[in-house]
Amino acid sequence: MFTFPQQVCEIAQHLVKAGAEMLEVGHPLISKEAMAHVSAVVGMDLGVPILSHARAHPDDINAVARSGASWVGIFLGVNPITERTRVSGSSFPSLLEKIAASVHHARQQGLLVRYTIEDASRTPIERLLASYRTAVEAGAQRLCFADSVGLLDPKQTRLFIRALRHEFPDIELEGHFHDDRGLAMANALQAVESGVDWISVSTNGLGERCGITDHGIFAVNLHHRGERTLDANQGKYLHELSKYVATCSGHALHPATPIFGEHAFTHTARLHVKAVKRDPDSYQWTDPVQFGQACKISKQRIRSNIVTDTVINDKTVGWDIVGGLFWEKGRQSAKPSESELELFTAGIKPGDKVAVIGASTKDLIEHLMAMDVNVTVYDFSKGMCDSLKEALSPNAPPIRVLDITAPLDRELISYYDYVLNDRLVNRFTTQEAKKALKNMVALAMQGEVRASVKLGLYAMDEKMIELGKRRQVLELFYCEDTQTIDFSKAGDILEESLLPHGQIDRDVLLRWYQSRGMETRFSDSSLKQLIEGVILDDGSQINVEHQCNFPDAQDTVMYSLKSV
Ligand code: SAM
């Protein structure tokens, strides 16, 4: 479970941003930490009611009152199994007395009451109705039907909920469904159709055994069915929440998880890929972008001088989002200046074969085109490639989709005289940088690679790290040993640290950064060490022939690399 109240508060904030209308926070009697969690969330005043758990016992209820929560969720099963295993020695009449006394006591403490019958799906209907009626007469505002062992299917759910709706037409009803038969989602949707007002959910469906109804997927289903709409951002917030809770809980999301899983919109079968390239709707039920996702196509190698036609590399999502805005609206400092262009192109002659990795480096590409150089542009982002093609048409040079960190096509080995890239290595982890540098040197086996790298932290990194330290959540998104930052795990800290990038719209900027994933910050020595460790397929290594600091960006160094 969560060890930092801060994480619980962060999650509470994410939940409300993602549209949750009530928060259930712990069982305060259990421990000081549990009480602290509840009080911390109550203290945030998030604008939604806070409900906290209690057995049908005055001590539990008093603890909820002390925590500041406005609702108490009293739970007590009333079936013969519960009598035998949970409240041994009780009879059904004594359980009814317990229900009446605890609800009444809670009401006297000024609490609103939800009464849950645990294991309701294995409780005879006459006991269900008698117990709920007792709770209502004692003052309960909401009744919750818990399928605690995940036994029901939608047909049975319909019968139970319709019976309760008929018996208690004016009381709020809630459904709580476990997923032991894999039917929690189906039961929850059926329960809504049969008249419940609330459904208990959890992020990523986390809960006992197989968990309960998944919050994000349920919310998207209600949205799709027109039963409860999401606003323009809540789909993305649900995705962020899912990733954040996966990190805090240590339970990674299965890649095939609907909507928010890594593979939820990734197409692999050749026929599917062909159709999706014509029209994503051919194999997608909805637009992934509204959920912070993207239509991804698995890597395909096509003979001819190929280059992978598209790639699976999560980081493409961010660059697809920013596209040509990078040079149309981006800040000047992110593109090579005049003096830097001179350094990149020194000694290059008309007719030389030059590869530029990174379509965003449009100024350098245009500079090379004006030098009558035989230039080819490679970029892993189809969005960036398409934007550059459009920006340079009708004279655009060959612009190809290629992930420079992925295995290289043999036909490209040693094809170029020069391979240039501007602050590309800054977008990589150490592993990615190793693969990329190896591939770039292989592309220019007889030639030269010129790679500029900004050394050390960016101003935004520093802001995020400072905030992360202050809130004691730094280790969630920053590894000090490897100087690696994970923008996808930084949650609100990323949003609070966001610095303008020219006139690029803040929402686009945020989604671009969130999809940038992990990036390592290099020093000159750590980069040299990395370069030394690279062995090319023919056994040769990489030598740093020359390096120079950019005149107007002192913390950025251009490295000239050759295979030796
Ligand atoms: N100066 C800019 C900066 O600091 O962000 C550009 C850095 S880099 C050249 C950005 C470009 O490289 C983008 O067009 C991006 O799509 C592309 N890129 C990033 N990772 C890549 C990869 N693994 N393979 C190929 N292109 C990649």
Image (cartoon, rainbow, N blue to C red):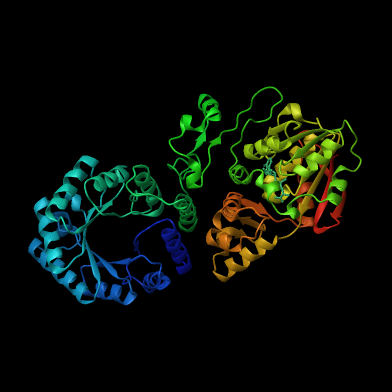
Left or right, residue 523 beside residue 241: right
The answer to whether 17 is drawn above or below residue 354 in the figure is below
Quadrant for the N terminus, please: bottom left
Question: Which residue occupies the extreme front position in the image?
Answer: 394
The answer to whether 275 is drawn above or below residue 142 in the figure is above
The image quadrant that residue 89 belongs to is bottom left
Is residue 520 in view?
Answer: yes
The image quadrant that residue 476 belongs to is bottom right
Left or right, residue 346 beside residue 247: right
Q: Quadrant of ligand 1?
A: top right
Left or right, residue 243 beside residue 78: right
Frontmost residue, 5 versus 233: 233
Q: Residue at x 68, y 45 (%)?
A: 432
The image quadrant that residue 500 belongs to is bottom right
Is residue 406 in view?
Answer: no
Q: Where is residue 304 in the image (x, y as percent from the top left)?
A: 70, 22
Q: Position of residue 65 (x, y in %)?
A: 29, 75
Quadrant for the C terminus, please: top right
